[in-house]
Image: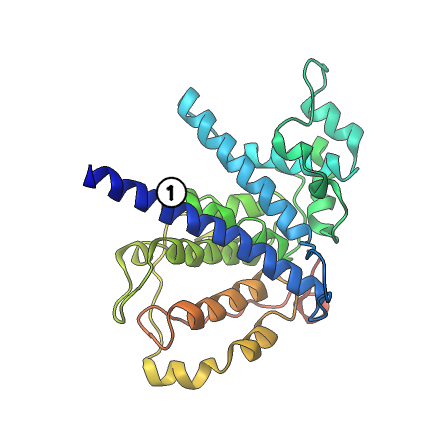
Amino acid sequence: MSHEKDQQRELFRRQSRVRGMMLGLALGDTMGGARGRLPGGGALRAGVSTQLACFTAEGIIRAQVRGKHKGICYAPGVVLHAYCRWAFLQGIETEKMRRRWNSHGHAVWPDGWLAGVPALAERRGSAPATVTALSRIEEGQEQMATTSRGCHALTRTLPLAVTGLGGIAQAGALAALTHGDTAAQAATTHAAILVHHCLTHPDPEPGPLSPPLRRIRPGSAARGDHRPRVLRQTHHRRRAQASLGSVPARCRRAGGRGTAGSARAGRHRTLGAARWPLRSGILSRPRRFPRRAGVRGGRAGR
C-alpha cells in the first residue's frame, strides 16, 4: 500500500510541475506582451506563444499515442499538423489547410479538443515566421521553413521537455518546421534541456553536472546533428555571482532582441537565478549567436 501511495505522490508531483511549466510559459508570454503594463483587473490574456505551445503539447500527445499503437511515428510531422489546425482556427490559408489535411472531406476538420477552445481561435499577437512557413504547406515540409531565428521557435517548443531526453533530441526538428536558422534550432534544444532539468531535479546540489545534462549537447542542432553534446561548466561560484546581477537586469539584457537565441539566454539566466543560484557546476554562460547579414541588430521575424 505504501508503495502505491509513493507512486501516486510521484505522479502528482510530476503533473504539478508540468502544469506549472505551462502556466509559467503563459504568464511569461502575458507579461512580455504587456511590456510591464498589466491591467488593473480582469483576466490576463496570454499571447500567440501560449497558443502555439498548447498545440505543440497536443501534437506531442498524439505522436506518442500513434507511436504506441503503430510502433512508429515521426513526431515533427504530427506537430506540424497541430500547427496547421491552429492556423485554420486563426483564419490563415484555410483552403490550403483543408486541402492538405482533409481533401476528401470524410471527417470533421480541424479535430481535437483544442479546436473547441474559443481563446485559441482569437488573434493574440503575431508570429510572422510561423505563419509564413505554414502558408507554404503545399510546397512540402522540406521547403516551407523560413530563414528566421525568431523566438517563437523556442517558446512554442518548450512542452517537449516533458518527454525526456529522447524527445528533446527532436527539439531542433520541431523548430526547423518553420525556422530554418540553425541558431534558432540550437537555442530551442538548449532551452528544452533547461526546462527538462527543472522538471526532473527539484533540489540540485552544487558540483558537477548531473548525468542527464552531461549527455546532452544543445548546440548539436546547429550542425544538423541531433545527438547529445556535453554542457560544460564555465564559472566558479564567485565569478557567477559577479556576472549574473539581478534577475530583472538579466531579463532586460538577454531578452530584448526577439530572437530564439535571446529568448534562450533570458531563460537560461533567469532559471539559473531561480533554481540554481551561484552554482557554477550547473550554470553556464549562454553562447552568443552571430548576427545575420542584412538583418539589423540580429532580429528576424518571429
Residue receiving disc 1: 166
What percent of the width, then of the height, locates residue 135?
A: 75, 39
Vertical placement of residue 128 versus 64, above or below: below
**Screen quadrant of the N terminus:** top left
Vertical placement of residue 68 versus 258, above or below: above
What percent of the width, then of the height, locates residue 277?
A: 38, 75
Residue at horizontal 44 percent and vertical 70 percent from the top = 274
Residue at horizontal 53 percent and vertical 63 percent from the top = 264
Residue at horizontal 61 percent and vertical 49 percent from the top = 180
The residue lying toward the viewer, choosing from 94 and 45, is 45
Residue at horizontal 25 percent and vertical 71 percent from the top = 207
Identify residue type, mark 1. Answer: Gly
Q: Is any part of residue 89 visible from this angle? A: yes
Q: Is any part of residue 217 visible from this angle? A: no
**Screen quadrant of the C terminus:** bottom right
Q: Secondary structure at mark 1?
A: helix
The residue lying toward the viewer, choosing from 157 and 3, is 3
| Residue 275 occupies quadrant | bottom left
Residue 112 appears left or right of 237: right
Residue 270 appears left or right of 103: left
Q: Residues within 10 Å of mark 1 (few under 14, many from 20)?
A: few
| Residue 40 occupies quadrant | bottom right
Residue 253 appears left or right of 119: left
The residue lying toward the viewer, choosing from 185 and 131, is 131
What percent of the width, then of the height, locates residue 77?
A: 56, 33
